[in-house]
Image: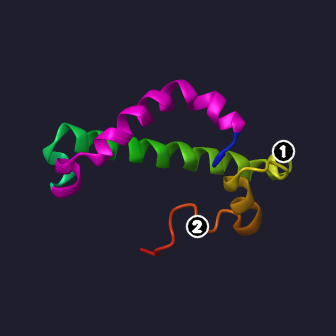
Amino acid sequence: MFVGEEFAILYGDELVPLIRRYEPAFQKPQTKVLPHWMSKDGRLVDFAEERMVELIKLEARARLREPERYKNNGDYLQLVLNAEGGKYIDGTLSS
């Protein structure tokens, strides 16, 4: 729903098992209390989040290169890209 069917087809085989492992790891007490590098579950959380950011940025950049192809997609990512373009693709804070 967030990034659309095409994204799910491309990355589903990688992301579905990762997200299934992420969710319980994210809820573990040591993940909430300790720095993530101190536990296997914490490192998994960091890896999963970094991978999602990487893939979503790739998807957003691909869509920005071909706006006409994607402009009618109804997913949230496309709605944001239609409204804001790539203005916040690297975050909202300036360096």
Residue 25 falls within the magenta-colored stretch: yes
Task: Specify the quadrant of the image occupied by residue 21.
Answer: top left
Q: Nearer the viewer, residue 9 or 31?
A: 31
Work out which quarter of the rendered image holds the N terminus and state it. Answer: top right
Q: Which mark is residue 84?
A: none
Residue 58 falls within the magenta-colored stretch: no
Q: Label 2's element?
A: loop
Work out which quarter of the rendered image holds the C terminus and state it. Answer: bottom left
Q: Mark 1: few, some, or many residues within 10 Å (few <14, many ≥20)?
A: few
Q: Is residue 12 above or below residue 60?
A: above
The region drawn magenta spans 5-33
Residue 94, given in percent of the width and then of the height, sits at 46, 75
| 11 lies left or right of 64 | left
Residue depicted at 56% across the width and 47% down the height: 56
Three-letter amino acid code at the position of disc 2: Tyr
Task: Specify the quadrant of the image occupied by residue 24.
Answer: top left
Three-letter amino acid code at the position of disc 1: Arg
Q: Which residue is mark 1?
A: 69
Q: CA distance from mark 2 to mark 1?
A: 21 Å
Residue 88, given in percent of the width and then of the height, sits at 58, 67
Q: Which residue is mark 2?
A: 88
Residue 30, given in percent of the width and then of the height, sits at 16, 49
Report the magenta stretch's main SS: helix
| 36 lies left or right of 24 | left
